[in-house]
Image: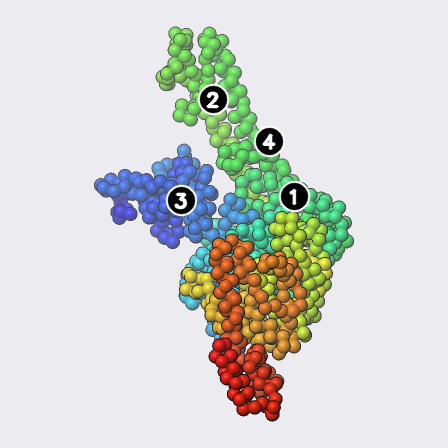
Amino acid sequence: MPSVPLEKLTPMLRQYVQMKEERPDVLLLMRVGDFFEAYGDDAELIARELNITLTGREIQGMAERYPMAGVPHHALERYLARLVKRGHKVAVCDQVEDPKQAKGLVKRQVTRVVTPGTLVEDALLDARSNNYLVAAVLGSPGPRLLCGVGVIDVSTGEFLVTELTEGAHLGRVLEEINRLNPSECLVPEDMEDLAEAIRGACPATLTRIGRRDLPRSAYDFLLDHFGTATLRGFGCDDYTAGLDAAAALLVYVKSTHMSAVPHIRTLATYSAGDGMALDAPTRRNLELTQGIYDHARGKSLLAVLDQTLTSMGGRLLKKWLDSPLLSVERIERRLDAVEAFFEDPIVRGDVRDTLRVVADLERLIARISTGTANARDLVALRLSLLQVPEVAERAATIDNEAIRSLCVELDPLTEVTDLIGRAIAAEPPLSVREGGLIRDGYDAELDELRGLSRGGKSWIAEREMQERERTGIKSLKVGFNSVFGYYIEVTRANLSLVPKDYIRKQTTAQGERYITPDLKEMEARILGAEEKSTAREYDLFCGVRDAVAALAPAVLQVAQAIARIDVVAALAEVAATNRYVRPVVDTGSVLEIKAGRHPVVEKLAEGAVFIPNDTLLDDGPNQVHVITGPNSSGKSTVLRQVALITLLAQVGSFVPADAARIGIVDRIFTRVGAHDDLAAGQSTFMVEMTETANILNNATERSLVILDEIGRGTSTFDGVSIAWAVAEFLAGRGCKTLFATHYHLLNDLEKSHPNVRNFRIAVKETNDRIIWLRKIVAGGTDKSYGIQVARMAGLPPEVVARAGEILTDLERNDRAKRDLARHASVSARTQKMQMTLFEAEPHPVLERLKTLDLTVLSPIEALNLLYGMQREIKEK
């Protein structure tokens, strides 16, 4: 971009540059006529990101043009969405006075800074996911280094805070931030280590905030915002770093919206230990919200469960999946509510039919509160609130205490519906500045202005008829345009009949246009009334919007109750449709599933019969299952379905099984599949070992661990050794573990560990071909059927044949691997002696020597026999 002295720029460009200097870290789009335009470096970046034309403005005395790019004002949200998706922040500078009334340069100011974490516009948001802005702040150093984490969703009004007290261990902080999956994360600029850790572990946009931008006292700042004398009612009166994080969020939100945020009227504390912690690999491997390979939502657990009918319910269901419960009491409360709807399909259907027409109350009230809502949003809010009494009436017939308590919270808010019904037109326009928003009869002044405007237009229509009769010109017309206002148009053929009192104003291809003094006088009255009417409508609309915004907390309470009813009714619908059963959840150590099914795989089977499987894990002989079997036989499906059924039970959902008993697990860990992280410089094997290390360091005796093919990324001997050691460690730790492997030597663990059992996937062999039976049965296997799988996958026949030959040779010389195992040993936990890991197969020569009767052999017979044995050993 050319460097241009400020004095050489036009007044409008100087206005742009001065505003840009105030916000150097964001892109600036300024309203100019029907466009939002950017200049200089911002124009070049926006043109490149949006793939639009880069133009320029001529600068006096400069050879180069000043770069310029613009987007139509009516399409601004679409372009903002693309910029925000790419991680940019955009300041929107709008006209704050009518250009027709402006004296000189039109006044403009930044009305909104659009950032990934502060969005409220529907077009920029996923309706069924929260859009979180998170702040992380480290407390003062001490015996226990606190980290405060604040969470806000401006689009719904949700505001949370917690404090993590695990010292300087950043892993726990990153785990919590990744669980929240924010769009944007705030970190003070003097906390570089924390910022770098978040930048490396979280895809969110990272924003650094200066200490000078934060309030001197976070406590007092929050008291002022909520208008309370203490924070004790919010449960955070003794917080320190948490309050700093919460205050940072509010300061940032107010600065981006250029206004207060009245819908954020409550602050809730939460404990990261209230729900089950699920690390990123586990979320990915279990495909909770998106497929592991194509990242499609349709192949996830959420897609199967999400039969919610409101956006609020959809977001709440996702939060439940993200944080399964650890309290049996809370789980049972949810299960009771689901069961009540499950057992009454008629009421369930009635409630769900009513919910279909309820709009997103949370985001509607957020837009109303932040001043970005239009009249259609108010109408949508009213129509949705009108459904609330019917939802309450129908749901109240369900025999369940939790549901009845939610019905009590369903206030119909008649003051809101009555106000909007009296004030706002039934079908208002999209724009709030072009009139047509307010009903007749709501405001006397507006009615008078409308009467003047309508009377004037009637006078214009009558005047046209009068002039035709007076002049005899049958084709005479009275028209209007924005340049000349009202005019009388006469064709060329009738110019001789024009009266002398007509004043010629314009010549056209068809004839002449004229005005008269009384016509211009009426024009002034009409246009004056229309302008005043439009301005009055906008003021009235803003008044109604502000009055509704004042009731935001009540609207949000209704929205949250609707969301909970929607979720439990949806879970009941899923259970009824898919043959799910209520699990027994307790604090015991047994995890038992009868005829369990994978909830996603069975839905995607496209008519194929899904083979269910039983699972029994406990803290006794069934603590660790070593599962062997061929590729593609269903091992991974069985492993994942056990984890998913456990997770669903602790969410408070029915589960895909004939019966299930779930002893609460504190965490679910999974290590499945092979992938690298090249951006972090980690190979496939390094990623595998890092994830495995996380499991071994954090799993407890109450954890459920799912491991699939540990040690496959290195040499066979290294892999077997690592897999053996990992399985043995978990057996000693007491974790309930499903360990799928192709290393058949691990079947020997059952011999030396009383809490390990072998299982295999049943296979039927026919003429060198295999049929997957998808059934897990007791006992191990020593076959992998890899070559048969390769044939099924379409490898060329000559490759398959050659692989078979090589396999035969390798199996003939397999004793080398068995001899290697003889040298491995493991420390006995109850004895000081060392045990051999694998018993080598006895050599045939040794077996013959054991049976020889040396007393009957002659010297020559003994010599011949010894010679034969030596030759046999050499040949081996």
Q: Secondary structure at mark 4?
A: loop
What label sits on residue 178 in the rendered view? none
Q: Amino acid at mark 4?
A: Asp
Residue 745, image x and y in percent?
A: 57, 72
> Given contact means CB atoms under 8 Å apart, are the residues at marks 3 and 1 in contact?
no
Instruction: Sort mark 4 into few (<14), some (14-19) or many (20+) by Cα contacts within 10 Å.
Output: some
Q: Amino acid at mark 1?
A: Arg
Q: Amino acid at mark 3?
A: Leu
Q: Earlier in the sequence, mark 3 or mark 4?
A: 3
> Given contact means CB atoms under 8 Å apart, are the residues at marks 3 and 4 in contact?
no
Measure the alpha-carbon separation of dots 2 and 3: 47 Å
Q: Residue at x 45, y 22 (%)?
A: 480
What label sits on residue 50 in the rendered view? 3
The answer to which quarter of the image holds residue 211 is bottom left
Residue for badge 2: 522
Residue for badge 4: 440
Above-or-below relation of 362 to 691: above
Task: Determine if residue 591 is in view.
Answer: no
Number of the front mark, 3 or 4: 3
Above-or-below relation of 256 to 509: below
What label sits on residue 356 in the rendered view? 1
Q: Amino acid at mark 2?
A: Met
Q: Is residue 666 left or right of residue 254?
A: right
Residue in front for this viewpoint, 483 or 836: 836
Measure the alpha-carbon separation of dots 3 and 1: 36 Å
Instruction: Sort mark 1 into few (<14), some (14-19) or many (20+) by Cα contacts within 10 Å.
Output: some
Residue 588, image x and y in percent?
A: 70, 70
The answer to which quarter of the image holds residue 520 is top left
Q: Secondary structure at mark 2?
A: helix
The answer to which quarter of the image holds residue 212 is bottom left
Measure the alpha-carbon separation of dots 3 and 4: 43 Å
